[in-house]
Amino acid sequence: MLSALARPAGAALRRSFSTSAQNNAKVAVLGASGGIGQPLSLLLKNSPLVSRLTLYDIAHTPGVAADLSHIETRASVKGYLGPEQLPDCLKGCDLVVIPAGVPRKPGMTRDDLFNTNATIVANLTAACAQNCPEAMICVIANPVNSTIPITSEVFKKHGVYNPNKIFGVTTLDVVRANAFVAELKGLDPARVNVPVIGGHAGKTIIPLISQCTPKVEFPQDQLTTLTGRIQEAGTEVVKAKAGAGSATLSMAYAGARFVFSLLDAINGKEGVVECSFVKSQETDCSYFSTPLLLGKKGIEKNLGIGKISSFEEKMIAEAIPELKASIKKGEDFVKNMK
């Protein structure tokens, strides 16, 4: 059932030129001047789903906004600079996407980013809770396994928490899995869909190759290698860029794919499914990524894990302790904030 539903969402970016009567989304990008923020803002500006694009950062946003505003698509674009302009950036927004934070450098784990990015995400999501409490919140800032619990706790503090509207964007893991499987099997990547569950770091990234559509088979040694490559693909890019950054362009694509899927669902499109790291009761972890049926109010239904192989079961069991620790770390951060 899931696989039949799952593909249309993935095609969202490729057919982002479709139009419907309700395409009037007001979208904010927080961290719009950065390595992910700029290409993500470009992709959002290119979409007819977006009518207003507000860009926030602590530097360069007037320039990025001026540049994007010359593009011949209908979204109005405005840049906002510094904390005092953040409330105006957020007012009236339907969806906020947060790629803000520092990128990984060679030798850094996503967890090394924690202290800097935790503070950034806590401050930005507090502004969202105050200025656009009803908006969909899509967090890209790593470590997602901790920044989503941070976002939830901040929204709880402000009394506006809705677990159906807070999403950790793990779409890049799905995009990579689709690309790598297609490459190995000589398939069109646009037709491949691999659900990826769990979290968004190392061994917490669990590609469910057994649920891939179309069905694919790999010998165990190849499956182990492929799974490892999907889990460590971020590091592959960090190493290839040799200190000049992390995955920014593929992340911008994946972020846009998720945003377009969510906007399609808000606009009433049925059968839109994406994986995302959200509040969950599917496992022992209080947050977990699984395929979600998206709807007008965010998560319509958590589609759960489904039938999996023993190899995948083992990966889940191994991921849970690390996930629980990352979740607790995020929750504790907000509890201990001044």
Image (tube, rainbow, N blue to C red):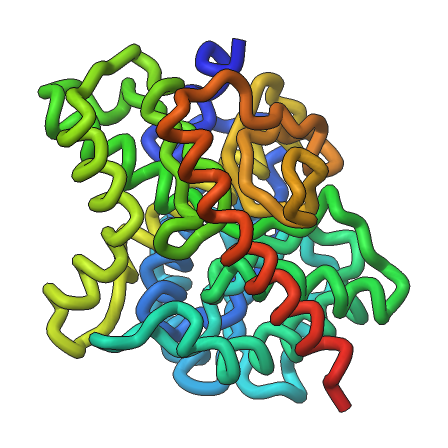
Which residue is drawn at the image coordinates 21% and 30% (left, top)? 223
Q: Residue at x 36, y 43 (%)?
A: 173
Tell me if residue 303 comes above or below residue 41 in the rendering.
above
Quadrant of the drawing holding the C terminus: bottom right
210, 90: nearer the viewer? 210
Question: Which residue lies at the image location 16% right of the left edge and 21% below the top edge?
Answer: 219
The percent position of residue 69, horizontal first and vertical second, equals 41, 63
Q: Is residue 156 above or below residue 254?
A: below
249 to the left or right of 330:
left
Residue 16 lies in quadrant? top left
36 relative position to 2: left or right: left
Q: Is residue 216 visible?
A: yes
Question: In the rendering, at what x and y percent does residue 289 appear?
Answer: 54, 41
Residue 137 x, y percent position in the rendering: 64, 55
Rendered view: 211 above or below 249: above
Q: Position of residue 65 (x, y in %)?
A: 43, 70
Can the viewer see residue 53? Answer: no
